[in-house]
Image: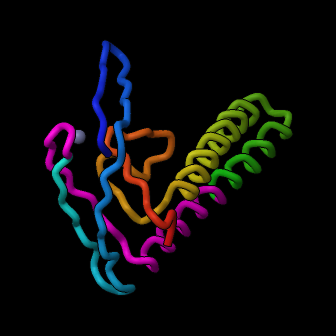
């Protein structure tokens, strides 16, 4: 999380100059989340991250998996609509299939990125946050 940033209109680039490590205790299963506050040594921003227990992290991964299944169901329904031969259903089916693919990919990448630590863009699929958090070891 030690970086400096160059920005120009419409884009931002971050160059990492090293990594600071913080030891954060995950809450035990059944305990509420832990909010961990740190100050970025590079930009002095006060950052609060939410840390989930191992069981809560697995629950969050389960929700992402459900998102993949819902996306898959949308694709199947969309293909049925496309195959119906009726113009209105084909348009709706095609739209549902595209939405299903997008939702499925979003949920799948979200599940892969789910580490039980959120905040400042961490854990969001397709986002490389300015203050990225990397776990060591990588996942619970
Ligand atoms: Zn910073």
Give the residue drawn at x 63%, y 49%.
104
Q: In the figure, 75 relative to 139: above or below?
A: above
Front-lying residue, 38 or 18? 18
**The N terminus sits in image quarter:** top left
- Among all residues in the image, which is located at the extreme front? 18
Residue 110 part of the magenta-drawn span: no
x, y percent for residue 135: 43, 61
Residue 45 part of the magenta-drawn span: yes
x, y percent for residue 37: 18, 60
The type of colouring in the image is rainbow
Segment colored magenta:
41-69
Residue 16, by quadrant, is top left
Lateral position of residue 45 relative to residue 34, left or right: left
Front-lying residue, 81 or 114? 114
x, y percent for residue 120: 30, 47
Residue 57, by quadrant, is bottom left
Front-lying residue, 59 or 102? 59
Q: In the figure, 93 relative to 107: above or below?
A: above
Lateral position of residue 69 relative to residue 87, left or right: left
x, y percent for residue 126: 50, 40
Give the residue drawn at x 32%, y 58%.
21
Q: In the figure, 77 relative to 16: above or below?
A: below
- Among all residues in the image, which is located at the extreme top? 9
Residue 81, by quadrant, is top right
Q: Which corner quadrant of the figure contains ligand 1?
A: top left
Give the residue drawn at x 80%, y 37%.
82
Give the residue drawn at x 16%, y 51%.
39
Number of numbered discs visible in the structure rendering: 0
Lateral position of residue 12 relative to residue 67, left or right: left
């Amino acid at each position: 999380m030690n970086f400096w940033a160059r920005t120009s209109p419409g884009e931002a680039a971050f160059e990492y100059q090293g990594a600071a490590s913080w030891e954060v205790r995950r809450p035990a299963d059944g305990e509420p989340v832990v909010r961990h506050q740190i100050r970025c040594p590079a930009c002095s921003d006060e950052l609060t991250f939410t840390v989930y227990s191992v069981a809560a992290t697995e629950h969050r991964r389960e929700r992402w998996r459900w998102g993949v299944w819902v996306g898959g169901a949308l694709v199947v329904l969309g293909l049925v609509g496309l195959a119906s031969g009726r113009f209105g259903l084909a348009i709706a089916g095609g739209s549902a299939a595209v939405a299903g693919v997008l939702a499925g990919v979003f949920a799948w990448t979200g599940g892969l990125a789910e580490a039980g630590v959120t905040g400042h863009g961490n854990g969001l699929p397709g986002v490389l946050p300015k203050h990225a958090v990397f776990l060591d070891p990588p996942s619970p």
